[in-house]
Structures are given as C-alpha cells and as structure tokens.
Amino acid sequence: MIRVLLFMLLPLLTTVGAHAQNASAERGAELFQSECARCHVRADIEMRITNDWLGESAFDLYQRIMATMPAETPGSLTPDQYLDLTAHVLNMGRATTPVEGSNVARLANLEIEQAAASDGIDYYPWPTMNGGMHSNRYAPLDQINADNVADLELAWRWKAENYGPRPEGLNVTNPIMVNGVLYATAGTTRNVVAIDAGTGQTLWMWRPQEGDRFDSSPRKNSGKGVAYWTDGEGKEVIFVVTPGYHLAALDAKTGRLVESFADGGIRDLVDGLRMSPVRDDLDVTLTFPPLVIDDILVVGASHQVSYRPPHADNIKGDVRAFDIHTGELLWTHRNIPLPGEEGAETWFEGSETVNGNGGVWSSMSADTELGLVYLPVESATGDRYGGDRPGDNLFTSSVVAVDYRTGERQWYFQHVRHDIWDYDTPSAPILADLPNGRKVLVQLSKEAFAYVLDRETGEPIWEMEERAVPQTDVPGEWTAEKQIFPTQPPAYDNQGFTEEDLVDFTPEILEMAKEAIKPYRLGPLYTPPSLANAADGTIGTLSLPGTLGGTNWEGGAYDPETGKLYIGSFTMPSVLSLVPGAEFSTVDYIQGAARTPTVEGIPITKPPYGRISAMDLVEGDIDWYIANADTPERLKNHPLLEGVDIPRTGIPTRAGLLVTKSLLFAGEGTGGSSIFRAVDKATGEIIAEIDLPASQTGQPMTYMHNGKQYIVMAVSGNGPAEIVALALPD
C-alpha cells in the first residue's frame, strides 16, 4: 500500500511545484487536530481513503480538501497548509508505515519538470471578501500569466441597474465564490444575489424590506458583500448585514431565509446596543459582512461620519459574536470600556460614559490556530475635536486581538492616541506567514504606516519610537504629547506638510502654490486641527495624509511566496478647520467648510497623487513604487503646463489590488479610468492594460471554475454599475 500512496503523491508534488518541497505530514497532523478533528475521526478517514481514493491522483484529493475543509470555512487555509493536511490524510488512510515529511521532500527533489500551480486545477474558491480569514488577497493561480494576460477578455457582465429603488451608479461589493456560485450585493437596499460563476446568470435574489429602518440608515448602499458558512454536510448559508442593521441568514442554494436562525432568519442587531441617552436618531449600521469563524459570527458597527456630530455622545460601536445556528449572542467586546474596566483610565473625567462610536466598520481577520480574531477599531466621536474625551481613549484607533470563542481580549496596539485626524483603523489586518517562518500581523493605516506585529503577542517586530508631536491651541481640546512611530518599514506615502511637498512643475506654479497655502498652518504628521479664525490669521491646518488616507478599506495584497506586500495609497491633503458647534452641535467645535487649495485645478502637492508600493516584510523595506494611473488629460492639457514634460502622475484614488502566483493586478479604484493593469510583482513594470466597461470599484478577486481562471470585480462610473468577469479566450 505504501507504494500506491507514494505514487499518489507524485502528481501532487509535480503539480504544486515549490510548495511541495515543504509538505509535512507532521504539520498536517497538527492542522487536522485544530481544523478537522471536531468533525472527522481516523476510522472515517481510513474508510474514505480505502473506498474512494486508493489509485486516484492525490492532487484530486488535495483539491477536494481545499474545496471542502475546514467545514465552516473551506479554502481558508494556505496552499502549504492544504499540502500538509493532504499528506497527513493519506497517512491516516493506511495501516502501514506512514509517509514522513522526508519522503515527501525526497519525491519533490526527483528530476521532473514541475508544472505551474494552477495546471490541472479544476476548482479554486474565493470564500471571503479578502480571499480568506488571513486577508491576503492572494491566490496561487497562474493560468493567467505574463505570457497571456494581454489576451484577457470579458467572459460575462452582470448589470446591477434593476436592483434597488433606482439604478445603482456606484457598487463596491466584493463577490465571494464557493461551489461554482458567486455571491454579491447590489442596490442601495443591499439586495443579495447569487450568480453562476461561469456564465454570469442570476440564480436567485433576496431583497431586504426594512421600511423606516432603511429610511433612517446612515449608509444606504450596496455594501461590501456577504459571508459564507457550511456545515460540510450540505447545509450552506449566506449572511449579510443590511442598511437598517439587521443580520440576515439565507439558504445559499435558494436565497430563502433560514428560519431556524434568530427570528425567522433575521437578527435585529440594534437589540442589546449601548444607546445614547441624548440622541433620538439611530446612528448605526454596517456595510461590511460579518466574519465567519467556525460556528461563530463576529459583527462590527459603523456610524455616520463624525466631522460635525450633533453630540459627543452616540451609540457605542461594540463588537459582538453570535451563534451561527441560532443567532444567540455569545459575547461582546466593548471598544469603549465601562467604568472600572481595563482602558477606562485612558478616558479622563469619566468621558468613557459620554462618548460614542469606536466601532469596527471595516473587515476583520482571524487566526484559527491561535484562536484569535483581530478587530480594526475606529476613532470615537468626533473626528475633528475631542475636547469631550480627554485622554488616549483606548481601545479606539487600535487593532485588538480577541479570543473568538470567549470574547476575552488578549492584546491590543493603539496606533493613534486621542485621534482627532480621523485616522481610524481602516482595513482588515493582514496575517502574513513570512518565508522566514515568522507569523506577523500587518495593520495598514490612514497615516501611511504599516505596523508590523507578532500576531500571537502584539509585540512589534521592529522597534517603534514614541516621539513628541505638535500640541493643540484649540480651547478645551486635549492632545497626546507623544505618538507612535515605527522605525521599519518606512512610511509608504507622504506624511506631514511642508513647502517641500508643493507642486513644482514650473517656477511659476511653485510660486502660485506658495501663495495658495499662506492662509493655512503646515506641520509634521499629527499636527492638530486649528481654528478657522485662529489668532495667527490662519484658517485651518493642511494635513497629509488626509482624512481618507493613505490607506483606506481596500487595504493591501500579500504574496506568501515572496514575503512582499502590495499597498494602494493616495496623496491628498485635508484641511482640518474648526468652527464653533453653535446651533449645529452641543460639541464646542466641529469641522468647518475650508477647501483644500489647488493651483488653478492642479493638485497642491507633488505627484504621484496615487501610488502602488511593494513592501518587503522580511527586510522591512520598500522595494519599489509606481504611480497608480497615467497622467489625466486635464493635467496634460492644462494651460499652465503647455510645453512642460511632467512625470506619470497617477490620480488621487486607491488601486484595487489582487496578487496571484504570477502577477499583481491593479484597477484604479473609485473615480479612476476603466483600465485594469497586470504588473510584474518584482519590478513594478506594467505588463498589460485591459479595458473594462467602467472603473474598478469593488476589489478584484479570482477563482478557478471548471478548469478556467476568472478575475471578477464590480465596476462603476459609466451608467449603472456592473459585476464583470475576465478570462482567457476559449
């Protein structure tokens, strides 16, 4: 039997290539205990291997395990982990001497031609909005590669125009694909749709009907997508959070509500919230899907933008976990602590009781081996003035690691103390398994730092320094004397604003830029907002990065084979200008109406205005960066630039990124052109440009279906929004 099983391993090793040399049945045994043993016992595995798999290709077994395991989150492990698991399953399936990791390595070293990772793969899922619970946005596929990527064409188009009360002009959904079906959201009412992954045919649609709750929602839009769960025995469920803040469970095959979940398939997420005693409006919702971990749903909360809040007090954005079968509340993590709890001492004068927000409005990540879910927590009310909340304000503007079974906080890292720049934590923490064996968490940020932490302990990988920062002169405000600055990796976009940042295409333009910024305060990163009628005659602070980043919800894409992280960011300052709350607010100061200056429409800063950076997470360096787009025609043809040769400027959008075994893919994001690019991962060289019907607005994803690789994304900006699929011609 050992001979048969070794022969079975050979196709797997030759197909998966570089991964196979690291395959380990011993590691696979540990994975089996953590991910599979709760549903499968050795006798069951032995019977299945003996009855169904002896004599078959181990690669087919590898694909089957990847497509179905772990039962709750298929496809959520890395390719290396699935190889280890396959080796262990093969060992379990026989009664003779096991195939040790050394035997696997010996077979891998045979002088045979190693095929590409996707050769022969019939199916590869994309089971969460970021490709898996590690949020890597990576797939080990290369059917589409540098040699043929220029041949990509539209395989199908799905139009969102008839979903919702009016045609949808902007869609930012992030489709998932499981078992040949895409699941996505569309329309301002956030309809859920199931789409055939190979043809684009609509299979079913579910429409929430929320009445007044929808009418009063602070964020009416299609949302960012859905979550998927299966019990591994045929039951499949799609979960979505609606604009009115309900959690709905839908049968993945039919779109009907799962009546055994909560109240006939819907859980009212407002129930149990810590409400504000001074606000009558219901300022809470969520545009991101919940995170599914085992039999647990973890759900965040978001609110209205808090530049001009009516009160400092608001609903508190607690993170909660629910039983995936019943909808029962399992635990609550209070990002704004109760009096006497850990962190309350950082809210001076009891301000933890009279402030709100502090939710998780973005996507989350999880490490099932460590049993941790990672929460990217936003700032508290308000985004520009924090005089009502003196202190550092834990656990806002932090990444927090929580035991996903109990809700107990294990560690936290606050990257902005007393946030008054709206530098809340904007994207899913990226869990990176580095080529050197280290397991880290990377939190990208609006301030354009990548905070690299040990994901078990939260300890920084490289030294971080506390540095003194400018202090406020706004009456009643409080500012932290020091903020955290990583020593590595370096910032991946511009920080702080000085005259050195001003656009200088010509001496005339530079002088005009200097004149334009005279009414504003300048300064380094963390220069605080200032009054619109300050005593020094200024009307506000020019802050860079601006309120939207740096990085925002799109995050980055990580390549586990090379240890490289790809980041989209843009360079756009914001004016932080405060005016009295007066009749608008009980808060002393709120954001004023000052606008970012330009030079007759030319951005005030040097280009690039948007960029893509490649960061080496092993060395802590930035390898290269490129502009995210070509120079727009309005700049090329600007009267002040006639006859001037300017560099490729990019545009102030954030690229949507996807990384595969062969290539980095990048769209231009909301507001960009309808060009989708394939980029050399090592150099940043643009290999191909593919035309889309409109600009990429949802993040691109990829999958294999019936042996064909597709790249799918939402596009918007040219009529009603669509979801489109790219593939190679037949």
Image (spheres, grey):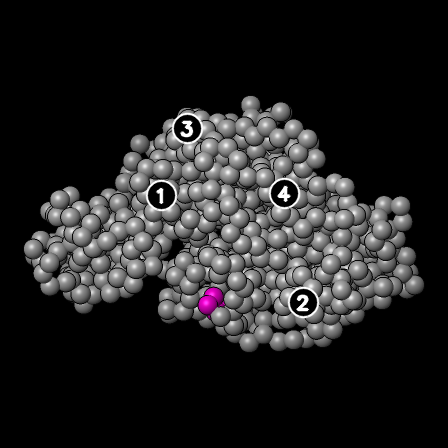
Mark 1 highlights which residue?
A: 231
Q: Main secondary structure of the magenta part?
A: strand
Mark 3 highlights which residue?
A: 254
Q: Amino acid at mark 4?
A: Val
Marks 4 and 1, how far apart at CA: 28 Å
The percent coordinates of residue 464 (x first, y second) are 58, 74
Q: Amino acid at mark 2?
A: Gly
453 part of magenta stretch: yes
Q: Is residue 673 above or below residue 373?
A: above
Mark 4 highlights which residue?
A: 270
Q: Is residue 656 above or below residue 387?
A: above
Out of 425 and 436, give the one closest to the viewer: 425
Mark 3 falls on what kind of element? loop
When asked about the image quadrant of residue 512, the answer is: bottom right
The percent coordinates of residue 532 (x first, y second) are 87, 55
Marks 3 and 4, how far apart at CA: 27 Å
**Stretch of the chain drawn in magenta:** 452-456
Tags 2 and 3 touching, CB below 8 Å:
no
Q: Amino acid at mark 3?
A: Thr
Which quadrant does the C terminus fall into? top left
When asked about the image quadrant of residue 336, the answer is: bottom right
In the displayed structure image, the side of residue 417 where residue 538 appears, left or right: right
Q: Is residue 30 above or below residue 322?
A: below
Disc number for residue 340: 2
